[in-house]
Image (cartoon, grey):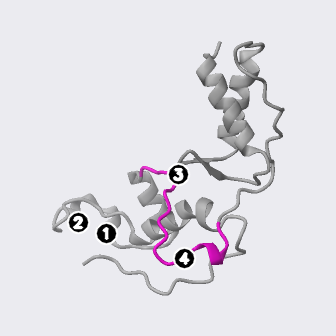
Amino acid sequence: TPSVAEVMEARELLQAAEGQHGAFRHNGRMIDRPHLRYAQGIVDRAGDVSEVPKAAPTKIAEGPIHGKWFEELTEGTVVQHALTRTVTEADNTIFTTMSMNPAKLHLDYEAAKKTPFKKPLVNSMFTVALLVGITVLETTHGTTVANLGFDKVVFPK
């Protein structure tokens, strides 16, 4: 059985979600459907906890999770992304071979040992694709049709 504090926090979150259409910020955290389902599960498991006032039932939005509109993305905006990702050797191998990149620097441990890096480097185009993908949820999901291009992508030397 959830504690009274957990139930109160879950109800507060569900109440904050009312009227929201997709992901939103609550108490400094990005909240989306999985968070709301978890909170609803806590409330459902709590049953009749008499010390905690009942909140009105909340409908969890099933619509798309929205990013920001162009006008909301002012210069200098810093976005804390909810998604994170560990890049694996398999990611690099799959992306490099799918993109038809034959560079030994990305695939061949023996050849890479002769470089200053001493091991294969992650394909830089995979890095760019991953960074763009991670940003979608909080920046453009539901507010743009497609990325039409990038003005400047610079790799460190």
* Label annotation for residue 74: 4
Q: Is residue 148 magenta?
A: no
Label 3 vs 4, first from the N-terminus:
4
Q: Nearer the viewer, mark 2 or mark 4?
A: 4
Q: Are marks 2 and 3 in contact (CB under 8 Å)?
A: no
4 or 1: tag closer to the N-terminus: 4
Q: Amino acid under label 4?
A: Thr
Q: Determine the secondary structure under disc 3.
A: loop
Which residue is tagged 2? 111
Q: Position of residue 132 (x, y in %)?
A: 53, 68
Q: On the picture, is 156 further left or further right than 81?
A: left
- Residues at circles 3 and 1 in contact by the CB criterion of under 8 Å: no
What span is colored magenta in the figure? Answer: 68-86
Q: Pointer 1 and pointer 2: residues touching (CB < 8 Å)?
A: yes
What number is the disc on residue 83? 3
Mark 1 or mark 3, which is nearer the start of the sequence? Answer: 3
